[in-house]
Image (cartoon, rainbow, N blue to C red):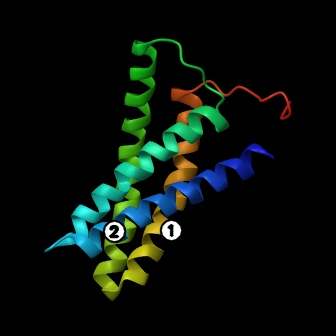
Amino acid sequence: MSLFIRYVIFAVVSTLVNFAVQETVVRTAPIEPLMLSILAGTIAGFAVKYVLDKKWIFYDVYTSHAGEARKVALYGLFSVLTTIIFWSFEIACWTMWETNSAKYAGGALGLAIGYVSKYTLDRRFVFQLKKAPHDA
């Protein structure tokens, strides 16, 4: 499977995890669930995406606690930028149409834009892209 296809699949998986957590929070939070749901979904999506990217996109191996902490910190820093893009689209669509469908459509668009940007940043600054034997 090509790198691009894996990346797209993992972005979709991460997005689905994000949205599932958001929907769970919206259904269970007693009041004002919007920001809490977005935050919880973002954290869940981040964790899933980091593990998938590290292992199956960049074929990164564990080197040390310090090295891993550096990678997580850089990955997180770049995630902040892409999260701002994601949240901006999601909140803008919610504000304009005030429906969950609009919120999730805006979120999906924001995540797609963010993931393209994030791949470029991660490849250059976080992980050294290693080719899998079958991708060579």
Numbered-mark total: 2
At 35% from the left edge and 49% from the top edge, which residue is drawn? 43
Q: Position of residue 83 (x, y in %)?
A: 38, 53
| Numbered tag placed on residue 37 in the rendering | none
Residue occupied by mark 2: 24
* Dot in front, 2 or 1: 2
Up/down of 41 relative to 69, above or below:
below
- The residue at 44%/35% (across/down) is 75
Q: Is residue 11 left or right of residue 57?
A: left
What residue type is disc 1 on? Leu
Above or below, comparing residue 24 to residue 5 in the picture: below
Q: Quadrant of residue 39?
A: bottom left
Query: Would you call the spot at circle 1 few (<14 residues within 10 Å), some (14-19), or many (20 or more)?
Result: some
Comparing 110 with 135, the one in front is 135
Is the Cβ of the residue at disc 2 closer than 8 Å to that at disc 1? no
Q: Position of residue 132 (x, y in %)?
A: 78, 29
Q: In the rendered structure, find residue 109 and report the number of the disc placed on it.
A: 1
Sequence order check, earlier mark of 2 and 1: 2
